[in-house]
Image: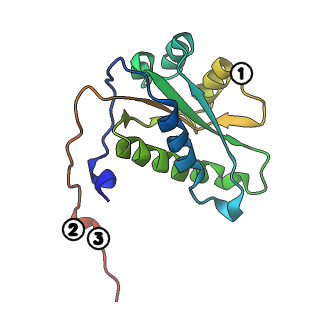
Amino acid sequence: MESIFRRRSVRKFLELKVEDEKIEKILRAGMAGPSTTNQQPWEFYVTANKDILEKLSKCSAYASCIKNAPMAFIPCYREDVKYSDFAQIDLAIATQNMLLSIDQLGLGGVFLGVAPEIEVMDRVAEVLNLPSNVKAFCMVPCGYAEKPSVPIDRYNVTKVHFID
């Protein structure tokens, strides 16, 4: 539960490489997520290539932080699954698992939305040379955070409604 409350959006990173073992654990966490009828529509693109990170940083007005990250995950989904209308939901769950594991492993990251913005999705697809049936869902720059995360309690009792 600690990672749920400690996880924060990290946009500033130290210039340290993320270890391959940690990258694999983060990917495993993403793939451990539930998906509609277990369709597992995900494809995960991973890069530490500075040229690609620079290009990705220009795909969205909100993605500039990715250029200074040591690496990034780009969770994508296949459109050719049976329940394609649920693929983005499946990717949201997978990405949340990844973000929690990033925190658990002592790293920082941030969710940078791509879908459902078609123009942004197309720009990311062009940078990554994605197959036509694979669509970019989001980008997650990742690395060692410049500052440690501080837990914040966002519980708001006025948002809870008990029904008898």
Mark nearer the N terminus (2 vs 1) = 1
Q: CA distance from mark 2 to mark 1?
A: 46 Å
Q: Quadrant of residue 32?
A: bottom right
Q: Residue under label 2, please give it.
A: 157
How packed is label 1: few (under 14 Cα within 10 Å), some, or many (20 or more)? few
Q: Residue under label 1, please give it.
A: 129
The quarter of the rendered structure image containing the N terminus is bottom left
The kind of residue on which mark 2 rests is Val
Secondary element under disc 1, as helix, strand or loop, is loop
Which of 159/66 is in front? 66
Q: Residue under label 3, please give it.
A: 160
- Percent across and percent down for residue 45 are 62, 31
Q: Which residue is at a point 79% across and 56% down the rendered structure image?
A: 82
- Percent across and percent down for residue 148 are 22, 35
- Percent across and percent down for residue 164 are 34, 89
The kind of residue on which mark 3 rests is Val
How packed is label 3: few (under 14 Cα within 10 Å), some, or many (20 or more)? few
- Residue 103, placed above or below residue 18: below
Q: CA distance from mark 1 to mark 3?
A: 44 Å
